[in-house]
Image: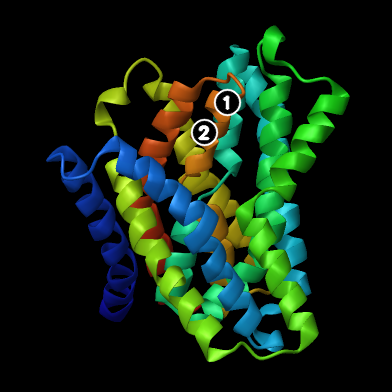
């Protein structure tokens, strides 16, 4: 049990030390809002896509091509979206809050925190496995977000069916993460080995992604924003960090997943709400303040829930 405790601590603690560093640096005004804006663009549009490209382009086919796991994750993400769509309107009456709440439940920070956790838990096998899952779940995250935020948008922000379809296609087709993964798959089909010059250059950019993303995540914490909607934010965060991952892991175990595959299922569904959920909520005139609170609370809660989940899975010999 002590071994499992130390294993879990070594995975989670470094991540949240860097997140805390970001919060401290912002608090003492070492970082600025302008820097964070540029940093987020650099990570999302350059560094993280390079990381995904390298992981997929250089992985052994046997390490990443797990069709059963991909199908399971697609089905589980769909279920984690559809079930709240049915239940949440029964308890939340304000349309703007409904959209933000539902997005907070199903949309995970699988790319940023997920890749870091996968690396810490399973090394290159973990990042390669998760990278192969990401194009499918990131696409679903974006499509479902556009749909649900449009359904519950104010009258002046609602999209026609044609505009909705156009928005979905644009959101998916211009997503840098999806583009990088598609390019990596094309590269693999060519059968070419990656030149050293290319590998090292992309490697430098890849290595920047996690530290910058985690520092930015911490620097964007705003504890003073926790007012007025805390009850809903806590409820959505509990669903995101406790209920959804527990159900997903139990279902994955029932389908026979263990080891790296089961760990990646936990990572995909156990992480906090995605940073992009706040951005999209604001763009589509949903309750972006609620989305911001869900992001903050779920991130803080995940410090404990991710540790507990990894500890339990490790102690049970499942990962």
The answer to whether residue 304 shows anywhere in this view is: no
Q: Is residue 160 above or below residue 125?
A: above
Q: Quadrant of the N terminus?
A: bottom left
Q: Residues within 10 Å of mark 2 (few under 14, many from 20)?
A: few
- Left or right of 291 in this view: 189: right
- Left or right of 275 in this view: 132: right
Q: Nearer the viewer, residue 206 or 315?
A: 206
Q: Residues within 10 Å of mark 1 (few under 14, many from 20)?
A: few
Q: Quadrant of residue 251?
A: bottom right
Image coords of residue 140 (percent x, y): 71, 48
Q: Secondary structure at mark 1?
A: helix
What residue occupies the far front of the structure in this picture? 197
Query: In this figure, which residue is indicated by the disc labeled 1?
Result: 283
Which of the labelled discs sits on residue 279, or is there none? 2
Image coords of residue 248 (percent x, y): 61, 56
Image coords of residue 104 (percent x, y): 54, 36
Please say if the residues under marks 2 and 1 sit with CB atoms less than 8 Å apart: yes
């Amino acid at each position: 049990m002590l071994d499992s405790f130390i294993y879990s601590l070594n995975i989670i603690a470094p991540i949240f030390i860097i997140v805390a560093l970001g919060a401290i640096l912002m608090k003492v005004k070492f970082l600025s809002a302008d820097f964070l804006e540029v940093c987020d663009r650099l990570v999302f549009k350059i560094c993280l896509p390079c990381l995904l490209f390298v992981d997929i382009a250089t992985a052994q086919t046997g390490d990443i091509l797990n069709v059963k796991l991909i199908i399971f994750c697609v089905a589980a993400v769909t279920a984690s979206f559809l079930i709240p769509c049915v239940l949440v309107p029964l308890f939340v009456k304000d349309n703007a809050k409904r959209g933000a709440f539902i997005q907070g439940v199903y949309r995970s920070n699988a790319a940023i925190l997920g890749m870091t956790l996968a690396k810490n838990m399973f090394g290159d096998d973990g990042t390669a496995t998760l990278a192969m899952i990401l194009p499918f779940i990131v696409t679903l995250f974006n499509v479902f977000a556009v749909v649900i935020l449009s359904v519950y948008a104010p009258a002046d922000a609602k999209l026609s069916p044609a505009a909705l379809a156009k928005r979905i296609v644009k959101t998916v087709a211009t997503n840098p993460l999806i583009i990088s993964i598609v390019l990596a798959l094309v590269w693999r089909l060519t059968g070419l080995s990656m030149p050293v010059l290319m590998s090292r250059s992309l490697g430098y950019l890849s290595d920047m992604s996690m530290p910058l993303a985690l520092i930015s995540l911490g620097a964007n914490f705003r504890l003073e924003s926790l007012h007025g909607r805390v009850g809903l934010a806590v409820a959505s965060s509990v669903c995101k960090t406790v209920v959804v991952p527990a159900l997903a892991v139990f279902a994955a175990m029932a389908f026979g997943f263990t080891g790296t595959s089961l760990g990646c299922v936990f990572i995909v569904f156990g992480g906090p709400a995605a940073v992009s959920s706040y951005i999209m909520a604001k763009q589509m005139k949903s309750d972006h303040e609620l989305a911001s609170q869900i992001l903050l609370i779920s991130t803080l809660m995940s410090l404990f829930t991710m540790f507990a989940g990894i500890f339990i899975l490790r102690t049970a010999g499942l990962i």
